[in-house]
Amino acid sequence: MRRVYLDNGSTSFPKAPGVGKTMMEFIEDVGCNVSRGGYNISYSLAERILNAREKLCELFNFDKVSNVIFTPNVTYSLNFLIAGLLKPGDHVLTTSMEHNAVARPIEEAKNRGIEVSIANCNDKGELDLCHLESLIQSNTKAVVIQHGSNVSGTLIAVEKVASICEKYDIFFILDAAQTAGVFPLDMKKMKIDGLAFTGHKGLLGPQGIGGFIIEDKLADSITPIIHGGTGSISDSLVMPDFLPDKFEPGTLNIPGILGLSTALDYILDKGIDNIRKIELRLTDIFLEGIKQRNDIKIIGLDTIEGRCPIVSLDFIYRDNAELAFKLDDEYGIMTRCGLHCAPMAHKTLGTFPKGTVRFAFGHFNTEEEIYYAIDSIQKILDS
Ligand SMILES: Cc1ncc(COP(=O)(O)O)c(C=O)c1O
């Protein structure tokens, strides 16, 4: 049976050309550690890691390579930023559309005496900016927010949120899990203080590598939440206060960084605009094909304006899990069904607790695959 992968919101597949080869070559032919060996191949490996940081700076328009921190994924990055920044008595703002990668560390912060407010989003997932602004207090430390929803694909207006943060001198932390590699993210222009990314979605790298890029002022306000060896100032029992070491304890995922670096070469060469155009074209075809039916509810916005290439559907008269199962079992179409680690978003969108079937497109998908998916959905519904 043919296989059609439409679960790119969970992780992208295939990965960028060469990612697997780079990782395999490192493991089989190099294999050493970085910043912990006094020999040439360790030094040249350090250069390759630096090079990966440089590419991330290029992608997100940032000027300090040392401020690119590697972590296992965006979840770890958000924990570093949220738990490390917020101290008892602080107030933090987020939205009703967040993934648990933001929602859970913020919920946990409440146990440490941190006040939390949640700005409303409407049933399309769009953020109410006036409500967000009205929730700001004198002790508000940060706004932590996702760029693109992994449930409805709805985007938030990053620059408008950034202006509010700037007006009140509040840190702006962005969860770019669903948009990094697909939408232009310019840290300087968009005034983002902390940008958290994951390597295995739109960045087309392997699982287990992610990170964050951080402005100095935010980095100075954050206490490391994980402590350990960094290969630097080893005579001290406290973490170095310089970057990236301050937030990079323990051995890095070197194969992951090198794999991501190869993926970044591909993205920078292909161009984000080209990637996005293809993905949104596929999303558009899908939305147009599905719109015709009155037994399917498109969750969120029904055009590609204000969206990333993710579409959640509710099959009104059918069991969503059954639909997802049949798509896979009978047509080889891989989707994801359920709450997608974002219960708050489903409450906002009116799809809790039933959840949705999510179709998430990547630029390696073809138009023919999208027509095949539309046709397969119709056949299941009409059978
Ligand atoms: C918006 C958003 N934030 C965070 C995450 C968590 O990503 P990771 O599992 O790579 O940490 C996801 C993954 O689905 C996501 O969609």
Image: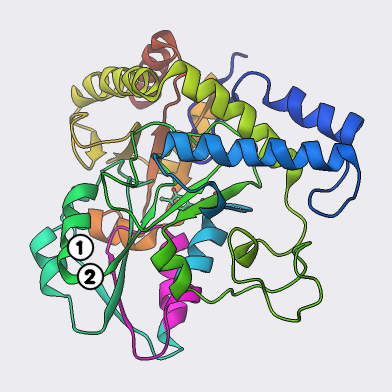
Q: Mark 2 packing: few (<14 Cα in 10 Å), some, or many (20+)?
A: few
Looking at the image, which is closer to me, 236 or 75?
236
> Does the rendering let one see residue 126?
yes
Q: In 3D space, how far apart are the residues under numbered discs 2 and 1 (Cα atoms)?
A: 5 Å
Looking at the image, which is closer to me, 53 or 307?
53
Identified at 59% across, 28% down, the residue is 263
Q: Which mark is residue 296?
A: none
Q: Quadrant of the N terminus?
A: top right
Magenta extent = 83-109
The location of residue 367, given as percent across then percent down, is 38, 11
Left or right of 100: which side holds 124? left
Q: Is residue 232 above or below residue 188?
A: below
The location of residue 166, given as percent across then percent down, is 20, 62
Looking at the image, which is closer to me, 54 or 183?
54
SS at badge 1? helix
Left or right of 166: which side holds 222? right
Identified at 84% across, 55% down, the residue is 36
Tag 1 residue: 166
Find out whether the residues at labels 2 and 1 contact each other: C-beta distance under 8 Å: yes
Q: Amino acid at mark 1?
A: Glu
Q: Which mark is residue 169?
A: 2
SS at badge 2? loop
Identified at 40% across, 84% down, the residue is 110
The location of residue 26, given as percent across then percent down, is 82, 32
Q: Residue 369: within the magenta?
A: no
For the image shown, how many numbered marks are present on the structure?
A: 2
Looking at the image, which is closer to me, 267 or 348?
267
Identified at 41% across, 8% down, the residue is 368
